Every structure is written in structure tokens, then in C-alpha cells.
Image (cartoon, helix red, strand yellow):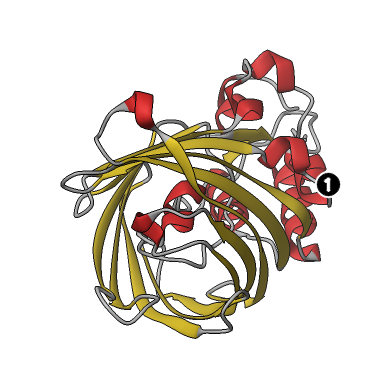
Amino acid sequence: MIQGGVYGQTSEISINDLQTPTSPGFVLSDQTPSSVSRPTNPRSLVASLLTLQRGGALELSPYWLLPIQKRSDLTFSKYINNKLPIIQTLSISTTSFRSDTTSYLSVGARLHLFRIYNKEAEILNDRIVSLLTPKLDQNNQPLPLDLNAIEMARDSLNELKPVFLVEIAGAMLGYSPTNNLDQLSNARNGVWANFLWRPFQSLNVIGLTRYINNNNQKEFSQSAEYFDVGGSLGFESNKNFTINGEFIFRNDLMTNINTHRLAIIANYKIFDQLYITGSYGKNFGKVDNIIAVLGVSFAFANEPLKIE
């Protein structure tokens, strides 16, 4: 790592994405703006609010909560070349929301099982290292750094995202019909996988497979086993805005009854730590199936990586 005042300011980058992902607990409850969660880089700590559902979620990534001295050997080059970033991307979350008479509480987790960046990431990393390396003129005097070129290269590096990624997630959802914690019981469990392919930096395609098991609770209609398959197509118009369309087909493995979800989701970044998500469409089922959700997420920390 390059040392020194100006070097120290330019030898780190963040790995933040445009948006924070939806908590697995919200995904499992079918009360989320997006049922196909776009895999993103982890944040140390994220708080999410679904304003129309009177609920919230707290998600943390244990690795990024470690003191920076404990992960000081992690560089950007090591990060992007790690195709199995399980420890670095593991996050754990808890979610709660309520209706007029019922409270819901869930725990969930997610991680990146497999990830690939394109060669451009390593090329840009090498370019920044070269720009940061002190050079001498013919009189052995240090040449000034090209700060504009360094900043442009850093911005390009920050915008790079994986071209292919496999994320797995799961959650358990409990409910209390009396809003009493003593009467909390398990209502739904689920596991799923998201497969992200990014043919261009501004376009992402996500495939989804998911298994859900309902216990015999009236809040989720009846005892059931669901298998979901679907996907989403997303476009990033600039650094602050994305729009996604998603379709999910659901089959009840016990009754062979089919239903689907169709929604449009928009995300807007107010600034690096504040994101707003809105969704409109049709949810699963034949009754109470209008999706009209507004969500807010707060990310409390940046995740810097060294360049060397």
C-alpha cells in the first residue's frame, strides 16, 4: 500500500452499490417491494423501513464489523479475485412488522456463493497502482501525481460490479396473533438462490429459485409448500436511479395451484447512505394482491478496500 498524505487519501476505494438489498425476512413474507432481491456488496450495518407495513429490518455483516486492523491484508485485488467470498459476504438480519392484530418477527441470512468480475477490474486496479507509484524526472526529482487521472480511475473502479454472481439466502418467519412475544410461533420457512448476470454495467438479469414451507397458520392461508421460479430485468440509468421489472411463478406443491407476482420496482439513491425504493404491481394470490409499497434503507458505514 502506498504511504504518505496524498497517497493515503487516494489508495482506498469503497465497494458500495447503488442500493441495499431487501432483508430475507421481508422477502419471505411477500411484503417486500421486490421479491427478486438483487445481490449487492455487503454493508456493515443496514436499517430498512417499509413505511406502509409499519415494519423494519436490521442487517449486519460480521466481517465488515471487524476492526480494520483485523482485515488490513484485504486488498481490492484480493477481493475481486476471490470467487468464493462466503466469509466476506455473509450477512445476518432480523425483521419485524405488524398488522392491526398480528406481529411478525423473522431471522435470516444471505451470502455470495460464487462471484466473477471481468478483467477490466484488475486492469483498473493496476492503473491506479501505477498512478500512485512515485516517479522521478531526469534530475531525480519527484514528479507531481496526476490527481485528476487517479480520481477518474478510482471512480471507474467504484462503479465496477460482478458480471456473474450466485447468492443463497434463507429465513424463518414467526408470528404472534396477540402481538405478544410469549405467543410467537413459527409460520413460514424458506430458502432460495439468486443468479445474477450483468452483460453490461447498466443492465442486470437475475434468475430466482425458491422453496417455502408454510405451517398451518391462518396468516398464510394454510399449510403449504411453494416452489417459486422467476426473474427480473434491471436497468441503471445513472449513478442514482435503477428500475426493475420482475415476474415470479409460484406452484403449490401440495395442491398444484399456481399463482404469480408481477411488479415494477424503482430505487433512488438520495446519497450514499440513504436509499428509497418504491414498488407497484400484483402480488401472489387472488385477493389482497395489490402491491403498493414504499421502502427506505439506511446504510451506516462504508467498506473501504486498499489498492496495492
Observer-nearest residue: 48 or 209? 209
Residue nearest the viewer, comparing 13 with 45: 45
Residue 34, by quadrant, is bottom left
Tag count: 1
Q: Is residue 56 left or right of residue 128?
A: left
Q: Is residue 202 left or right of residue 138?
A: left
- Taking 207 as reference, is 89 above or below it? above
The residue at 62%/26% (across/down) is: 62
To which residue does mark 1 refer? 82
Residue at 57 percent of width and 20 percent of height: 5
Residue 178 rendering spot, x and y as whole percentages = 24, 36
**Mark 1, other Cα within 10 Å: few <14 / some 14–19 / many ≥20:** some
Q: Is residue 132 visible?
A: no
Q: Nearer the viewer, residue 113 or 14?
A: 113
Q: Amino acid at mark 1?
A: Asn
Residue at disc 1, secondary structure? loop
Front residue of 287 and 143: 287
x, y percent for residue 26: 42, 52
Question: Picture quarter containing residue 8?
Answer: top right
Q: Quadrant of the N terminus?
A: top right
Q: Is residue 59 above or below residue 294?
A: above
The quadrant of the picture occupied by the C terminus is: top right
